[in-house]
Amino acid sequence: MTPDEFRELGHALVEWVARYREDLPGLPVMSAVRPGDIRAQLPATPPEAPGALQALLPLLDSVVLPGITHWNHPRFFAYFPSKTHLASVLADLVCAGLGAQGMSWQTSPAATEVEEVMLEWLRQLLGLPLAFSGVLQDTASTATLVALLCAREKSTGLALCRGGLQQAHAPLVVYTSEMAHSSVEKAALLAGFGRDYVRFLPTDAAHALQVEALASAVQADVAAGLQPCAVVATTGTTSTTAMDPVAAVAEVARRHALWLHVDAAMAGTAMVCPELRWMWAGVEAADSVVFNPHKWMGVGFDCTAYFVRDVGHLLSVMSTHPSYLRTKADAEVKNFRDWGIPLGRRFRALKVWFVLHSLGADGLRAAVRRDVALAQGLAARVDAAPGWERCAPVPLQTVCVRHLLPGASAAEEDAHNLALAEAVNATGEAYVTPAVVKGRRLIRISIGALDTAQPDVDAVWALLQRCAADVGR
Amino acid sequence: MTPDEFRELGHALVEWVARYREDLPGLPVMSAVRPGDIRAQLPATPPEAPGALQALLPLLDSVVLPGITHWNHPRFFAYFPSKTHLASVLADLVCAGLGAQGMSWQTSPAATEVEEVMLEWLRQLLGLPLAFSGVLQDTASTATLVALLCAREKSTGLALCRGGLQQAHAPLVVYTSEMAHSSVEKAALLAGFGRDYVRFLPTDAAHALQVEALASAVQADVAAGLQPCAVVATTGTTSTTAMDPVAAVAEVARRHALWLHVDAAMAGTAMVCPELRWMWAGVEAADSVVFNPHKWMGVGFDCTAYFVRDVGHLLSVMSTHPSYLRTKADAEVKNFRDWGIPLGRRFRALKVWFVLHSLGADGLRAAVRRDVALAQGLAARVDAAPGWERCAPVPLQTVCVRHLLPGASAAEEDAHNLALAEAVNATGEAYVTPAVVKGRRLIRISIGALDTAQPDVDAVWALLQRCAADVGR
């Protein structure tokens, strides 16, 4: 493709994206295609001859779009906010156009240095102490794996240089809450700890980790000859945005030399608001912290910020120095390839820059405050509605509700709520997530898409009530 | 940002990218900025107020561009080809504009199903057997980590469900060649094997793994009470594009129940040419294969294709099933979140589709053949040039050379070649990589940027000769 052909198609696709964003409110939120529908419309074999890309453009409308669940739709209330500001889209165009590789400083110094500055900006925006240094990774799943690998190597004195987890040692134990994200268990298993050595601790009525249970578990493991290694505390759990008591967890971690990883994947964005920072009070004692600019902050997926206090230790675990990667500048610069798992790195910091410049700290705070206010308004209406139960506190932007079936068994009520969530989603008018918390089914309404406003929240609440009546019939 | 503001800036940036690609041949290949130059031009603190994005556009030219090493420059001969076709850039614009999340099938069915079809197309293009299923990941580093995790769990009968690597077991051993990419060692260390249990086997004169050495090492480890677990064979090593004898390695792997992972990160693209498939003859016996469409194939970074034969085992190692991720469709679909480390997944398959459609199999093959022919031509000229040594066979697109200093010690000659490579790079007229192979310094000329043609190869060869004379003075 020549630059001129690129111009023609590029302009057409800029229009396509702009129209897509304009059309969003009228599209069904959740894709209604059936399994295999999209696949069946594509050839089973690759083309032999080169083809004009113009031919694909109509397929974006006919094949792709029906298969998209619209995360930027104002009535997207599922999972977590993962909005993509249009400023981020523009940065990705530039990033792809440059095709720069940021594995080493020298392979594109701008990729490294803009990332350094953007992580420093994010650190300041979140109010993290100066002692933290940050790096971009793809997802919180990966960052949490890196954190547990670093914890493992801290406890074993860098056993990876010797016999790894295969040398004789007291088994290492990882602690987290029963409400921790699934990626914490996955990371612990991938890091080799084994499920026998992962403790899922009970939570209180607000679904926050019980620190006494943590202390007891650690003591019991020490007594049993095991070696407590790491604890993962969550600021804003996935199911209910519960807040683990970070300061109290940090105190246990300090006493037993545990690595403390704070998972604020979704809620981290809220820390731009000073009045919300009580939520992770004590975070300054963490060894590592992860939050996702690609969630509530609106930087396009994927973009995870991983902060650590001991960069030297991170490098000891992650760095490799083959000759073909060494450059003259190495002593004076950061080589972010040594800060994570992948060697190759794209210029992700560009989209952080575009979004932070475009919104400013004021814009970021306003977006968080809008969503918290919308959630509190909805929580109040749920509380006042007969036949509905609110299942968790609402510190942030997620409201967990259950429609009650008086006289029904718990199992019947659970089945009713699952059916209710699926009925809501099938309308295409809004999209919510059914979840199970402590064995009971509930429906999560997670607020924070790009243009969600009061009428959208009103609409999903009305829809839940309408569908509840229909499903109950 | 409104869609109309996006239109205005989007059109401007399409022009910017097109002009950038047009201007490439005139730009210095390697960025000449000094450490800290870029950082110093950005504010130390984030903006408080929202800002117009127009203000950033001039900074792309004044701040970013001088800090870019141009991987799409026709005289980029460093590292490995990592070209980005403009078709891929267009796909990334759409991908970012949609902002779709492909973690589950339901969260955007098109992301999953287009990925399924594209991996099937890639499987056919590379001539891999039907038994392989593919998935996209970010980088080969990550895919190799996944491979070694799967190997570990195969050898231990899914010990991750019990005591992990911490339960009593004969220590597991990983084998690879001394020429394997650094990511293989890194993956083994992160997976917990420990350096004591990673064997770097000697290579022959062509820098390919000596299969007798592998067989002996495995036998010695078995005799010592260890458990051989995995072998990583490389098709096209990083330093010299050496070809490990996959079929012979596979035979050892079969005898000892080793997991066989084939790393064809760069060279995999060449397998689109049937006449080159002898290079990985025996690959059908592999348990896993990785190749990077984001290298020589020209799909923009990041985009790694990971193929496995036993999907069930991959899912056993990688899957998590919390309630908030379960959907009605799960029984009928693939959920690619369970095929790798990150939970979140962007719509990467779109850029594979755009590139494969745009080039077709014919175009892919022509690009590979162009570069192989260019490399062979250069190799012949090096062979004919007095004072120069070619340090490795040239099966693909990488030519490894050394400028000889008659009468000098090996150390002096090495220092001379490092200085020579740095002198070439400092001109900005071309960019090559100095490397060390078996203790000796050489210079890699890796051919395969987007528009590299005969005059560019002529130019880098003339430049090497000119700089050799200057540096030697």
Image (tube, coloured by chain):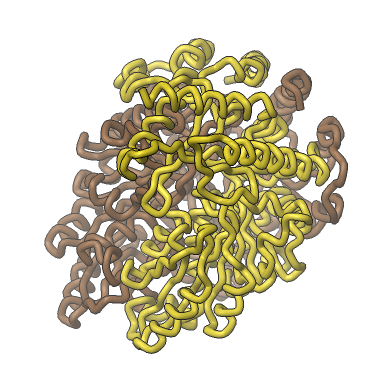
Chain colours: A yellow, B brown
Total labels drawn: 0
Q: Position of residue B279 (x, y in %)?
A: 29, 45
Q: Nearer the viewer, residue A295 or B439?
A: A295
Residue at the image position 83 percent from the left and 43 percent from the top: A362
Residue at left 72%, top 20%?
Answer: B3
* Residue A284 in view: yes
Q: Is residue A145 left or right of residue B192?
A: right
Furthest toward the front, the residue is A407
Where does residue A458 sit, x and y in percent of width and height? 63, 26
Q: Nearer the viewer, residue A405 or B390?
A: A405
Q: Position of residue A116 (x, y in %)?
A: 72, 56
User: Which quadrant, please, contains the C terminus of chain A?
Assistant: top left
Q: Is residue B471 left or right of residue A416?
A: right
Instruction: Determine which quarter of the picture holds residue B221.
Output: bottom left
The residue depicted at 69 percent of the width and 50 percent of the height is A270
Q: Looking at the picture, how far across and down is residue B107, in whole percent?
A: 45, 33
In this rendering, the answer to whether A230 lies above or below A382 is: below
Q: Quadrant of the N terminus of chain A?
A: top right
- Describe residue A14's horizontal placement relative to residue B376 as left or right: right
Q: Is residue B86 visible?
A: no
Task: Decide which of A216, B34 is in the foreground and name it.
Answer: A216
In the rendered view, does B232 fall on the left or right side of B257? right
Q: Which residue lies at the image location 34% right of the left edge and 62% below the top edge?
A: B205
Residue placed farthest to the left in the image?
B255
Near-viewer residue (A408 or A46): A408
